[in-house]
Image (cartoon, rainbow, N blue to C red):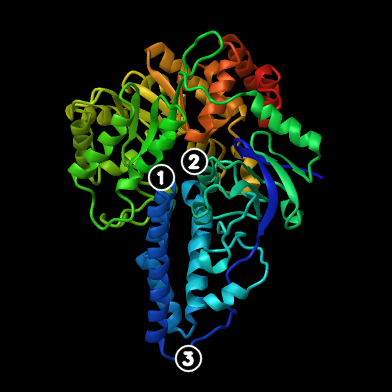
Amino acid sequence: MRLTGNGVSPGVGYGPVRRLVRRAPVPPPRDRHGGDADAEFARAEAALERVAAELEALGRAAGGVAQEILAAQAMMTRDPSLRAAVRERIDAGVSAARAIYESFAVFHDALVRAGGRLAERAGDIDDVRDRALVALDAGACRTSGEGSGRGSGRGSDTGTPAAGGDAVPYVIVARDLAPSDVAVLPHGSVAALLLEEGGPTSHTVILARAMGVPAVVGCAGALRVPEGAVVLVDGDTGQVRVAPTAAELARTTGRRAAHGPATYRPGRTADGCPVALLANIGSLRDLPAAVGCGAEGVGLLRTEFLYLGRRARPQVAEQRDAYRTVLDAFPEGQVVVRTLDAGADKPLAFLPPARHEPNPALGVRGVRAYAAHPEILTEQLAALAEAAAGATARLGVMAPMVTTVEEAERFVRACHDAGLPWAGVMVEVPAAALRARDLAEVAEFFSIGTNDLAQFTFAADRQLGGLGPLGDPWHPALLDLVALVAEASARAGRQCCVCGEAAADPALACVFAGLGVTALSMAPAALGAVRRALAGHTLDRCRAAAAAARAATGAQAARAAARALLPALGDA
């Protein structure tokens, strides 16, 4: 039996299936409390606070990108408007469980309607809701049967896998997984993830890549694979084989082995054209993996880990020490830091809530938020300047969500005033890509965030599995935008990096090189495969593959056309 999905996290996983299809109980629609509204609300508050504390603890234990995501979920749990909605329902006689369920449903629907990054958080809302229901009624949750929610158990009460002494790593099969599910997966006991739903650039996928776990998502029929069946999951091709033959197993694992172990030389094509291979870093805990996988530096340091889940903003000294640790890890390389990307889906507890926005995903966020809170940027740039003093790594600082030349000018000027000479911008908005030639007159380097650039270009929430094809980074329209940025960078003599998840695709990495991209940044676990793919093809071959992909009319055709010209990839 063979299944096909989207290969989203590279590698091959082989082992018995462990199905996760339980969910928290759904309280009856007319569930009411006994009459003491204050006591019932106290129960609800205690459950919500317990969930927030659990998520923060999980984040601290996991570190990296997981800590950012789980800290944001904890803040959702403490949202005053959510608490007010729960209180209002309880005052009307509704039970704590039903009040929580209905209140989260309102937030879920609002996020879906908002679209963009906020829509990505709808699944996170479901996760928090389920955890709160578990906290209210753990016994009922433990005995609940199969369901059709976001697919997995929630926390230790609901069956998230534990190491348990399993001799053979297992393949987790679920409808979908929440980020908190992935964050607690026992290291070394999970061979792969196989999800029936899920988008190719969801938070779950980002965490899987960071952990080096092969993953296939959007795989129709995955839940029909029986518990204990042995499956072979190819995170490169999206192919899944149930009960593979010895020949199939040998062919797939042999293909991977044929590439040989990763060699940590600088990234370059077969004819010697350099393409810097960098790591995406979500916290200091990601550094050992980045160094160990041979990263030439950091292409994206997400600084939100210093801010999320805190009641007061971090002091300059604390920030300086964290930045210096990253710089010292790559004394001969480069470290590119993204300044705080707050607003919309990343509220900060120590800042006053933003005014109501009908569509926050397209509101005051990223670089736009600095005008309202200039002290945040001033302190961050001061800390970066202090960290760079005496460091040998080249420090780049870039602003998120830049749209106009005026925004770029203000940011670059602020960096120069702080003593930071290499200032750039992220290209996540189609307008920035379309006018990259103007931005290149101001910005000193570009970094393309393909995740957001894709979802804004195609108006498709990247978290929704059903819309996954619309946000496929192989679509020629997205490749055209990347080409515009790369061409503008080349004319101005600027570095052009792709730091979105698409950079981790070995075939796309070759296409990006052919488009003129000069650096790629990705989860550390993907560096080896990308390094080998580049080394197997000349720059002319990469250019031919890029041209073929852009000449296609859709994502699948573009991928097929490019891969036909990249023979060193084999069946990968």
- Dot 3 falls on a residue whose secondary structure is loop
Taking depth in this image into account, of 108 and 24 the one nearest to the observer is 24
Res 34 label: 3
Label 3 Cα neighbours within 10 Å, binned few <14 / some 14-19 / many ≥20: few
Q: Residue 294 location in percent, x, y?
A: 45, 27
Label 1 Cα neighbours within 10 Å, binned few <14 / some 14-19 / many ≥20: many
Please state which amino acid type lies under the numbered disc 3: Gly
Please state which amino acid type lies under the numbered disc 1: Gly
Q: Earlier in the sequence, mark 2 or mark 3?
A: 3
- Dot 2 falls on a residue whose secondary structure is helix
Quadrant containing the C terminus in the rendered view: top right
Mark 2, residue position:
210
Q: CA distance from mark 2 to mark 3?
A: 47 Å
Taking depth in this image into account, of 433 and 217 the one nearest to the observer is 217
Q: Residue 22 location in percent, x, y?
A: 63, 65
Q: CA distance from mark 1 to mark 2?
A: 9 Å
Please state which amino acid type lies under the numbered disc 2: Ala
Mark 1, residue position:
64
Say which residue appears at 41% left-offset and 90% top-offset.
Answer: 36
Q: Earlier in the sequence, mark 1 or mark 2?
A: 1
Say which residue appears at 39% left-offset and 33% top-offset.
Answer: 300
Q: Residue 158 location in percent, x, y?
A: 56, 67
Taking depth in this image into account, of 470 and 160 the one nearest to the observer is 160
Quadrant containing the N terminus in the rendered view: top right
Q: Are marks 3 and 1 in contact (CB under 8 Å)?
A: no
Say above or below: 48 vs 252.
Answer: below
Q: CA distance from mark 3 to mark 1?
A: 44 Å
On screen, residue 429 versus residue 392, left or right, reads right
